[in-house]
Structures are given as structure tokens and as C-alpha cells.
Amino acid sequence: MTGRKNLLIGAYYRPPSDKGTSLQQLELSLSRINQSSNTNIMIGGNFNLGHIDWSIPQVIPECNSKHLGKVTVATSEAENQAILAHHVFSKLAPTAKYVIDGRCAPIVLKKCPACKADLVYGDTSIGNPAYWHGYPDILLDRSTCTVKVDMDESCETEETQEYEWPEPVAKKQRLLEQTNDTGEEGSILTLKPDIFTTCEDQFFKTEITLRQSFAQTITNAFYQVKQKPKLQSLCFPSFLTADNKVRIIMYNCEQDRLYISKDMYLFDTLCDHGLNVGTIVSIWLALNFENFQNEVDEEDLTAIALKKSSFQEKLPDTALSVYKHQLYRHLPRKRKQTEHPPRTTLGVRVLKSKYAESLLERLESLDSRFFKTPYK
């Protein structure tokens, strides 16, 4: 097609007995393609990559699918996050790196429940507290992931956090008031039912979960475009997962389009190793979107009746400017000033209460009677 990038399609087969040589040859072949030709590459075939570490071109002996299967018997949302981060998303992400939200991590969960490997926790905060900010459960390169098991199981919400930002609550309230005064239904995060697919699953049907996931996807997309403006025409993915289901959400900042997939199952007894190959490939394609996506014209999307999300249309200009220019990661936490309890001369800390005051008097009395420093 005139004006489009060239598309190179190839076929590949890796013998199941291969220990890495075949992959190295594939990498060598791909490196011979002229990188300046502005060509997209699509490779299909049978890779036989049931157990692969995507950070290196080598099949590893660990049975990753077996470890992943333990997500179905995980006893908490934290265990689900750990297993999915370590055995699904990191294996498919371009850099093979991930960060799990460290705020809600149990003290005892320092290693993956499935393989006992060390887990990577950290600060996943993103946004601007004056408008929207949150903590994705998992950060993956340019993508985010939300893991849900029990909707009632949660840690601190965005609104309960304190930051070194001016008037976050007042600004957020003004934004909601400005948006609702337009006379249209709902607020800035209200979703039109004819834009998104609906979900039958109990985990994903909760409105607050969907709203948070959409807001997280949009915020991350704007942040990534701020970091790398040339990607503004692409759709940035995020993931909403439960123990056996995944949905991919994608947002395009330039065209204000928000898409969500239907439920995709991670496991299928009819597939090799029990994994649903179609789901794994879909996650891989989404995580590696920079290599596979092409810019799609507005006219083409209109022709096939794909509607806009109307997010940017409803947003006041001042708020939209914040999304485009003032989103951050690693939001600064405000240091709380704590009042230290009084200390007696005996070095015993007590609390301020009637009982504490009585106890303090007794201690001071004992101190003066038995522990008084002798004169020199």
C-alpha cells in the first residue's frame, strides 16, 4: 500500500530438541535485514517454546508452565501477582523485567510461591495526585497490569495517600464539578456502554475495577507518550487479570480510542503444557507493541465504525494539559510529622493518657529515690 511500511513475512520451525542453536540462527537471519528499510517483520510457525526465558535466546530447563499452573491454587492476591509477574509477563516482555507494587507485599512473600525465585518489589506509582494517580499491581516496560482475585481485598486506595503536591483534593473536586456541569451523564471516568465490550466474569464485572483499569491505562499511555512522543500514534496496552483470565486494554492518545478485549483464558487442557497458546501469543504481541503496531488512519477507523472513547472531549483543557505534560512516576510521598512520646530519665517511653501520667509519676519517684546520680 502506498505510503505504508514494508511488511516482511517469514516462517520458522524450531525442533523440540534444540538447545538454543536454532534460535541463534534465527536471530542472525533477522539481523541481516536492512534496519534502515523501515520494514515490519512478522514471523510465524512452530517455535516449540514452552519453556523460554525471553531475556536471552535460549530454552531453559525450568518447567515454567508447571510453575504458572500454581496460580490457580494461590491463596491470596499477592501470590497471584507474584506468579503472574514472574512466570507470564516477565517471560514475554521485551526486557524481561517487572516491578510489583511493594506497598501491599506480605512480609513473608519475598520469593515466588511457585519457583522460590526472588521477587522484584518497588514503587509503581504513576499519575498526578491533582487529577488521577494510582499504583499498578505490576509494571512491565511500557505496560501495566492489574491483578484481581477478591474485589474486597485491597490496600490503601489512591485517595488515602498523601503527597507533596498543592491542593490535590480541591483540584480533583473542581475537575469533577467542571466535567459534570456539562450536563452529560457521569464524570470524567464514566464509560459509554456502546464503546466497550462487556464481561460476564464476576471478577471483572465490578464497576470500580473497570474504571480504575481504564484510568490506569489512559494515564500510563499519556505518560509513555510524554517520555517518547514518536509513539503517540500507537495503542499502549495494559492488562486486567484473574487467576485464569486476562483482558487486554489499549489506549491511543492521538486518536482518543480505548479498546478492551474479551476474556482470554490462560489455561487450556487441549493445548501443549496446559497453556492456551492463543492467549500467550496475544499477551506477547501486546507487550511488544512497538515492534508490531502500525499507525492506523482516522478514516480507516471511522469506516469500520470504531468509536472514540470521548475521554479527551469531556476533559477540560486545563486537565488535558496535565495529562499531556504533568504526569509522573515515583510520586513523592509526604513525610508525616510524628510526635515522639515523652521519655523518662529511666529511658522508658510512655503514652499520653491518665494511666500513663500516673505511671510516669511513679517512675520519676523511683528514679529520685533509688537511681539518683551521686554528687561527684
Image (cartoon, rainbow, N blue to C red):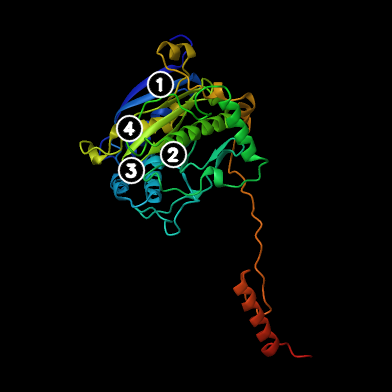
The residue to which callout 2 is attached is 145
Query: Of the residues tagged 4 and 2, which is closer to the observer?
Result: 4
Q: Position of residue 175 (x, y in %)?
A: 60, 31
Q: CA distance from mark 4 to mark 3?
A: 12 Å
Q: Which mark is residue 194?
A: 1
Q: What residue appears at the point 24 percent right and 41 percent down from the top-left corner?
A: 273
Q: Which mark is residue 141?
A: none
Q: Which mark is residue 263?
A: 4
Q: CA distance from mark 1 to mark 2?
A: 24 Å
Q: Which of the two labelled residues, at mark 1 and mark 2, occupies the earlier sequence position?
A: 2
SS label for mark 3:
loop
Q: Nearer the viewer, residue 89 or 265?
A: 265
On the picture, is 166 further left or further right than 86?
A: right
Is residue 54 in view?
no
Q: CA distance from mark 1 to mark 4?
A: 18 Å
Q: Quadrant of residue 84?
A: top left
Name, please, the residue furthest toward the top: 2
Q: What residue appears at the point 47 percent right and 51 percent down from the top-left corner?
A: 104
